[in-house]
């Protein structure tokens, strides 16, 4: 990712609330199947 200039950050509380997940995870609902 560094070669692409990408920097990962932690999910903020506001972002988590907006997309409906907890900032500490899990990031997918229980009914999601791989």
Image (cartoon, rainbow, N blue to C red):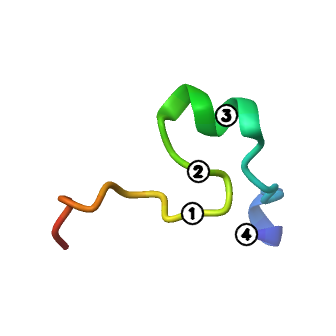
Residue 15 at x, y percent in the picture: 67, 34
Residue contact between numbered discs 1 and 3, judged by CB atoms under 8 Å? no
Residue contact between numbered discs 1 and 4, judged by CB atoms under 8 Å? no
The answer to whether residue 25 is above or below residue 15 is: below
Closer to the observer: label 3 or label 2?
A: 2
11 relative to 31 in the view: left or right: right
Q: CA distance from mark 3 to mark 2?
A: 9 Å
Residue under label 4, please give it: 1
**Residue pictured at 27% horizontal, 62% vertical:** 30
Residue contact between numbered discs 4 and 2, judged by CB atoms under 8 Å? no
Of the pair 33 and 22, the residue shown nearer to us: 22
Q: Earlier in the sequence, mark 3 or mark 2?
A: 3
Closer to the observer: label 1 or label 4?
A: 1
Q: Earlier in the sequence, mark 1 or mark 4?
A: 4
Residue 28 at x, y percent in the picture: 38, 57
The answer to whether residue 33 is above or below residue 23 is: below
Q: CA distance from mark 4 to mark 2?
A: 25 Å
Residue under label 2, please give it: 22
Q: CA distance from mark 2 to mark 1?
A: 5 Å
**Residue pictured at 82% horizontal, 70% vertical:** 2
Q: Earlier in the sequence, mark 4 or mark 2?
A: 4
Callout 2: SS = loop
Q: CA distance from mark 1 to mark 4?
A: 22 Å
């Amino acid at each position: 990712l560094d070669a692409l200039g990408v920097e990962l950050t932690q999910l903020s509380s506001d972002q988590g609330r907006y997309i409906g997940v907890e900032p500490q995870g899990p990031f997918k609902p229980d009914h999601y199947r791989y």
